[in-house]
Image: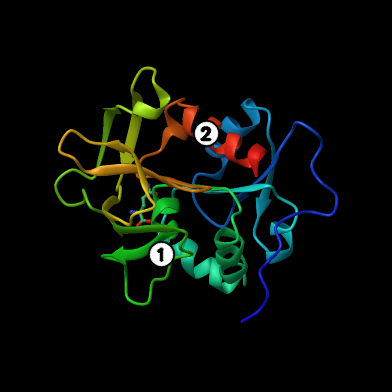
Amino acid sequence: MSPTFPHRTASPSVAGSPRVGILALQGDVREHERVLRSLGAEVVSIRRPDELLAVDGLVLPGGESTVIDKLARGFGVAEPLSRAIAAGLPVYGTCAGLILLADRLEDGIEGQRTFGGLDVTVRRNAFGGQVESFEASVAVPTFGGPPVDAAFIRAPLVVSTGPGVEVLAELDDGGIVAVRQGNAIGTAFHPEVSGERRFHELFLSLVRAA
Ligand code: GLN
């Protein structure tokens, strides 16, 4: 086993402005970039292992988890990324990003892998078939304020959680759609497309504290 992948940079980000990477192989990278910049973060794209060295936190965008998985392995970034997450690099995954953070996956394609980091089982395309995409107003008790406008686009669902996992949001039927475990946050929906910034704020608070 190789040593833990270091995620601290030798030349740290400018004081007060955390440097966040977005895995930019496929998916809604720009939407995340816009929200993170509006919150004062410095944002860089991550495609190669060495680029991971220079960030204080990582966002895994929505898109297509099967494609991101294949490209990440092809670019040699999948394993360093898994190690960085396991070592505590703050990470936030939306939709396909949540799938990639799941330790266990249901309804993946043949050979599909995840980076892991959240002790959850996630079912891919859990709403597919009947209603592929919808918007819902989702209460997130930890935020206290108004509910989150959440866009579900061929969304996954968290079907089971391990003991260390905090459920941040559920649908009316009890389906788990947002979770946190330590420095890892995952949402089945896309707050970045509906102008919702509180999940990114929570993520940046983890980045600043790390
Ligand atoms: N269904 C997609 C997947 O399997 C996720 C969709 C999304 O990220 N909006 O990766």
Give whichever of 55, 161 is nearer the camera: 161
Q: Position of residue 159 (x, y in %)?
A: 24, 54
Beta carbon of the mark 1 residue lies under 8 A of ligand 1: yes
Q: For numbered disc 1, what is the local secondary structure?
A: helix
Q: Where is residue 58 in the image (x, y as percent from the top left)?
A: 60, 49
Q: For numbered disc 2, what is the local secondary structure?
A: helix
User: Which residue is pictured at 61% across the width and 61% down the height?
Assistant: 84
- Residue where numbered disc 1 is placed: 66
User: Which residue is pictured at 52% across the width and 55% down the height?
Assistant: 26
Q: Which amino acid does label 2 sit on?
A: Leu
Determine whether, in the image, residue 171 is placed left or right of residue 191: left
Q: Earlier in the sequence, mark 2 or mark 1?
A: 1
Q: Quadrant of residue 116?
A: bottom left
Q: Which residue of the protein is positioned furthest toward the front in this rendering?
A: 163
User: Which residue is pictured at 39% across the width and 71% down the height?
Assistant: 112
Q: Where is residue 109 in the image (x, y as percent from the top left)?
A: 32, 70
Determine whether, in the image, residue 101 is placed left or right of residue 52: left
Against 18, is 88 above or below?
Answer: below
Task: Look at the image and name its color scheme.
Answer: rainbow
The residues tagged by marks 2 and 1 sit, at their Cα atoms, a distance apart of 27 Å
User: Which residue is pictured at 68% across the width and 28% down the height?
Assistant: 40
Against 4, is 94 above or below?
Answer: above
Determine whether, in the image, residue 177 is placed left or right of residue 16: left
Q: Identify the disc placed on residue 36.
A: none
In which quadrant is the N terminus drawn? bottom right
Give whichever of 58, 22 is nearer the camera: 58
Against 74, is 130 above or below?
Answer: above
Q: In which quarter of the image is residue 204?
A: top right
Give whichever of 122, 191 is nearer the camera: 122
In which quadrant is the C terminus drawn? top right
Q: Quadrant of residue 48?
A: bottom right
- Residue where numbered disc 2 is placed: 202
